[in-house]
Image: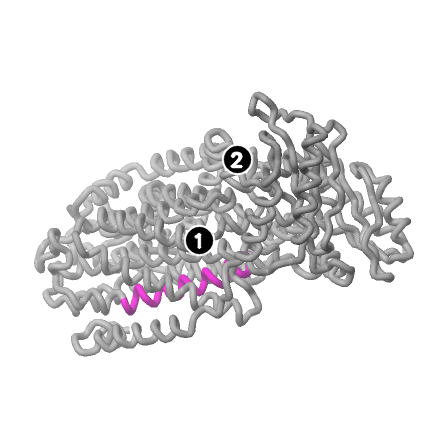
C-alpha cells in the first residue's frame, strides 16, 4: 500500500493521477449514459405476479396499446368548499360540447356519451387514448386535454383530469427536473456545511468539486451498468443515487482531510503527510464503503425491479465515491500548500487533538460511569422506539403526494359521486367461453358493484369489475383477494385478476418478501465485514446492536413526526426497507471510523485510553460528517412525493442519533464496560504500552 499512496501523492506522479483521472472521466462523459429521456417510476413486478400475467395477457386484446383519461366535470358549491352544486341542463350540454371537441384526440375517433352521477353533481367523460411512452409528449397531450375540456365551460364549473392517464402525468411531473432540483439543493447544503466545518474560504471547494465530479460520473456509469443488466433507472432512483454519492463521498473526504490535518502537524512535508493520512484513513474508508456497497447489492436478490435498480445504481455510485476520495482527492489536495487550510493552518510541531478538547473530556466522563451512560442511552433509544408498534404501512396512490395534484382531486370527486372504485376497475382476463360465467361469479363476490365482459380477441375476454371500495384501500385489497379465490375455482376459465388494485396488492406482497429476505442479508453481511475488519466477535455484535437500536428509534420518532406534525396517514411500503438499508450501512460507517481508530490506538495505549484517544481524534470529523449526511438526505424532502420525504426524514433522524448519541457515548461506554474483551478473540493491546506512554493501560490515569 505504501507504493500506491506514494504514487498518488508524490510530486511527479500526482499529476499523472489527476490528468489520467480527468481524461478517463471525460471519456465516460463523452460516451454518455445511453438514457433516452426522463422516465417516471415503474412498478417492476416479477412476471410471475398475477397482475403482471393479467397485464401481459391483456396485450393480446384489441386496444392493448391504449390508455384512458377520465375527465370529471363538477360545479363547486357556493361556499367554495367540498360541496358541489347540481349540474344544470346547460352544464350537461357544455360537457357534451367538450366531449365532441376531444374526439380528435381520442384513440377511437369518438368519445362515449358522458355519465352523470345519480345525485346530478358530477359528469364523467371517458377519453380513450393511444399509449405514449415519452414523458414529455404525454404531458403535452394532457395539457391539451385539460385546455379543451375547460375551454367552453360555464362559470364556476371545472374539468379535472384523473384516471390512469392523469396519475401517470402527475407522477411524471413530480420527477420533472427532479435531478436538477435535488442536485442544486444538495450542492448548496454541502457547500454551506463544508464552509462551516472548515471555516476556510477555499478549502471547502476542493472536496465539493471532487465529489461533484464523482456524482456526475456515477450517474453515467450507473445507467450503463443497469442497462447492461436490462434494468432502467427512473428519476426516483437517480435522485437517491445523487444524494447518496454526495453524502458518502463528502463523509470520506471529511475523514481523509481530518487525518491529513493531523499528519501535517506531525510531518513537515505535506506529500509525506498525505501518504501517511491515506495509509491511516484508507482502510477505514474502504471498509465502510465496502460495507455500504455489499448492503446495497443485497437488493439484487429482490423481486421488485425498482429495488434491484436502486441497489445496483447506488452500489456503483458508492464505489465511484470511494475511488475519488482515495485517489483524486489526495492528488488534488497535495497540489496546494498548508495555506489551503487558512486561517486555521496546521503547523508542523503543533499539538494534535488526541489528548485535548471537548471530545477528550467527554471520553473521560463516559469512561468514569460507562454503565450509567449505557443505560441512559438505552432508555433514550427505547423511548423513541415506542412509536414503532403504532406504525401503519401502505399509502394509497392518492396519498403519496405532499402537494395534492389534479389527478388526486379528480379521483376523490369521482369516488364521492360514483362507486368509489369506478375510476380504477379491476381487470379480469379469462377464456372467452367462460367469460360470462366469470362475470356472473365476480358479481356475487362481496364488495363488487358490477362485472361486465368487454374486449375480446375470440380466445380471451376482458371482464371489467367495479368495486364499491376506493382504490388502494384494505377493502379493495380484500375484494381482489376474494375475487382471486372465487374465480380461480372456475374450471377452464384460466382467470387472472389484474388492474391497479391487484397490482398494488402484488407490489405490497413482493415488497414484504423483499424486506424479509434483504434485511437478514444486510445484517449478516455487515456483521461479517466487521468481524473481518476488527478480527473480533464481541465488538461487531455490540456495534450491530447499536445501529439496529438507532434504526428502530429513528423509525419510531419519525412516525410521531409524520402523524402529529406532517399529517402523513401511513408509511409507504418500500420506506422501511430503504431506510433500514441506508441507516444500517451508513450508521456502521461511523462506528467503523471510530472503532478502527480505537483499535489502532489500543495497540499502544489499551482499550480504555485507546477509545478516549480515538473519540478525541475522530469526534469532530465524525460529528461534522453525520450532520452533513443527515442534511443531505433531508434534501429528498424538496420533492412533493411522500415516499422520498419519509426516507429522507427517517435517515436524517437515524444518522443524527448514530452520530450524536450512539457513536458519541453508547459505543464508547460499551467498550469501557467490556474492556479488553471488546476485541475478543483478538488482542490488539500491547502489554508494554504503559512503559511507552507513562500511563496505566486500564485508563484510570488517561493522558491529558
Region of the chain picked out in magenta, as a range: 307-328
Residue at (25, 38) in percent of width and height: 365
Q: Is residue 457 left or right of residue 533?
A: right
- Between marks 2 and 1, how big is the CA–CA gap? 25 Å
- Dot 2: few (<14), some (14–19), or many (≥20) neighbours within 10 Å? many
- Dot 1: few (<14), some (14–19), or many (≥20) neighbours within 10 Å? few
Residue at (11, 52) in percent of width and height: 343
SS of the residue under disc 2: loop
Q: Nearer the viewer, residue 637 or 69?
A: 69
> Relative to 82, is 48 above or below?
below
SS of the residue under disc 1: loop
Q: Is residue 430 left or right of residue 109?
A: right
Q: Nearer the viewer, residue 451 or 194?
A: 451
Q: Nearer the viewer, residue 293 or 638?
A: 638
Residue 594 place in picture, x, y as percent:
31, 52
> Depth-wise, is mark 2 or mark 1 nearer the camera?
1
Q: Earlier in the sequence, mark 2 or mark 1?
A: 1
Seen as rendered, the residue at the extreme top is: 79
Residue at (79, 44) in percent of width and height: 465
- Residue 500 can be seen, yes or no: yes
Q: Is residue 361 left or right of residue 136?
A: left
> Relative to 168, is 298 above or below?
below
Disc 1 designates what residue? 177
Q: Nearer the viewer, residue 284 or 400?
A: 400
- Residue 539 can be seen, yes or no: no
The numbered disc on residue 568 is 2
Residue 414 place in picture, x, y as percent:
67, 36
Residue 679 place in picture, x, y as percent:
36, 55
Amino acid at each position: 500500500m505504501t507504493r500506491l499512496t506514494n504514487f498518488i501523492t508524490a510530486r511527479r506522479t500526482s499529476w499523472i493521477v489527476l490528468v489520467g483521472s480527468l481524461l478517463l472521466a471525460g471519456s465516460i462523459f463523452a460516451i454518455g449514459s445511453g438514457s433516452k429521456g426522463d422516465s417516471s417510476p415503474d412498478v417492476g413486478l416479477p412476471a410471475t405476479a398475477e397482475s403482471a400475467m393479467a397485464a401481459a395477457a391483456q396485450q393480446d386484446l384489441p386496444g392493448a396499446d391504449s390508455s384512458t383519461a377520465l375527465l370529471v366535470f363538477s360545479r363547486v358549491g357556493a361556499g367554495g368548499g367540498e360541496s358541489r352544486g347540481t349540474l344544470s341542463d346547460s352544464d350537461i350540454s357544455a360537457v357534451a360540447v367538450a366531449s365532441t371537441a376531444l374526439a380528435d384526440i381520442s384513440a377511437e375517433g369518438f368519445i362515449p356519451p358522458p355519465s352523470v352521477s345519480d345525485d346530478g353533481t358530477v359528469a364523467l367523460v371517458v377519453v380513450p387514448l393511444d399509449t405514449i411512452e415519452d414523458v414529455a409528449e404525454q404531458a403535452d397531450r394532457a395539457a391539451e386535454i385539460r385546455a379543451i375540456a375547460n375551454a367552453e365551460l360555464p362559470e364556476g364549473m371545472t374539468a379535472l383530469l384523473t384516471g390512469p392517464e392523469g396519475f401517470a402525468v402527475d407522477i411524471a411531473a413530480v420527477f420533472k427536473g427532479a435531478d436538477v432540483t435535488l442536485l442544486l439543493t444538495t450542492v448548496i447544503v454541502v457547500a454551506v456545511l463544508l464552509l462551516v466545518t472548515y471555516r476556510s474560504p477555499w478549502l471547502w471547494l476542493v472536496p465539493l468539486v471532487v465529489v461533484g465530479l464523482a456524482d456526475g460520473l456515477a450517474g453515467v456509469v450507473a445507467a450503463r451498468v443497469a442497462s447492461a443488466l436490462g434494468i432502467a433507472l427512473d428519476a426516483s432512483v437517480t435522485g437517491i443515487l445523487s444524494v447518496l454519492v454526495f453524502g458518502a463521498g463528502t463523509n470520506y473526504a471529511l475523514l481523509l482531510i481530518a487525518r491529513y490535518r493531523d499528519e501535517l502537524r506531525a510531518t513537515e512535508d505535506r506529500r509525506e503527510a498525505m501518504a501517511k493520512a491515506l495509509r491511516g484513513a484508507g482502510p477505514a474508508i474502504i471498509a465502510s464503503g465496502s460495507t455500504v456497497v455489499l448492503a446495497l447489492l443485497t437488493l439484487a436478490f429482490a423481486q421488485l425491479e425498482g429495488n434491484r435498480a436502486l441497489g445496483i445504481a447506488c452500489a456503483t455510485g458508492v464505489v465511484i465515491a470511494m475511488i475519488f476520495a482515495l485517489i483524486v482527492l489526495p492528488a488534488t489536495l497535495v497540489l496546494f500548500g498548508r495555506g489551503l487550510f487558512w486561517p486555521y493552518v496546521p503547523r508542523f510541531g503543533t499539538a494534535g487533538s488526541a489528548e485535548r478538547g471537548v471530545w477528550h473530556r467527554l471520553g473521560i466522563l463516559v469512561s468514569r460511569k460507562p454503565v450509567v451512560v449505557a443505560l441512559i442511552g438505552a432508555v433514550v433509544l427505547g423511548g423513541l422506539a415506542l412509536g414503532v408498534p403504532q406504525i401503519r404501512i401502505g399509502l394509497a396512490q392518492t396519498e403519496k403526494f405532499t402537494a395534492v395534484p389534479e389527478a388526486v382531486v379528480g379521483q376523490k370527486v369521482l369516488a364521492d359521486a360514483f362507486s368509489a372504485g369506478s375510476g380504477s376497475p379491476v381487470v379480469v382476463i379469462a377464456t372467452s367461453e367462460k367469460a360470462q360465467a366469470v362475470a356472473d361469479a365476480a358479481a356475487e363476490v362481496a364488495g363488487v358493484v358490477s362485472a361486465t365482459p368487454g374486449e375480446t380477441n375470440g380466445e380471451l375476454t376482458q371482464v371489467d369489475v367495479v368495486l364499491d371500495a376506493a382504490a388502494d384501500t384494505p377493502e379493495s385489497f380484500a375484494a381482489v383477494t376474494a375475487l382471486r379465490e372465487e374465480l380461480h375455482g372456475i374450471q377452464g376459465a384460466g382467470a387472472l385478476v389484474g388492474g391497479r388494485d391487484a397490482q398494488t396488492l402484488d407490489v405490497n406482497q413482493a415488497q414484504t418478501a423483499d424486506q424479509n429476505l434483504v434485511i437478514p442479508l444486510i445484517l449478516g453481511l455487515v456483521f461479517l465485514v466487521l468481524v473481518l475488519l476488527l478480527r473480533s466477535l464481541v465488538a461487531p455484535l455490540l456495534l450491530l446492536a447499536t445501529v439496529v437500536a438507532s434504526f428502530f428509534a429513528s423509525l419510531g420518532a419519525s412516525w410521531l413526526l409524520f402523524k402529529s406534525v406532517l399529517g402523513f396517514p401511513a408509511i409507504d411500503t418500500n420506506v422501511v426497507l430503504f431506510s433500514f438499508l441506508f441507516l444500517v450501512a451508513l450508521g456502521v460507517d461511523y462506528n467503523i471510523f471510530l472503532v478502527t481508530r480505537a483499535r489502532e490506538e489500543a495497540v499502544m495505549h489499551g482499550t480504555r485510553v485507546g477509545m478516549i484517544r480515538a473519540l478525541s481524534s475522530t469526534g469532530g470529523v465524525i460529528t461534522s460528517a453525520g450532520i452533513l449526511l443527515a442534511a443531505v438526505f433531508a434534501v429528498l424532502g424538496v420533492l412533493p412525493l411522500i415516499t422520498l420525504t419519509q426516507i429522507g426524514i427517517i435517515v436524517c433522524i437515524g444518522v443524527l442519533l448514530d452520530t450524536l448519541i450512539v457513536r458519541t457515548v453508547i459505543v464508547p461506554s460499551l467498550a469501557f464496560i467490556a474492556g479488553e474483551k471488546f476485541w475478543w478473540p483478538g488482542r490488539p493491546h500491547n502489554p508494554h504500552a504503559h512503559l511507552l506512554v507513562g500511563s496505566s493501560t486500564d485508563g484510570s490515569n488517561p493522558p491529558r
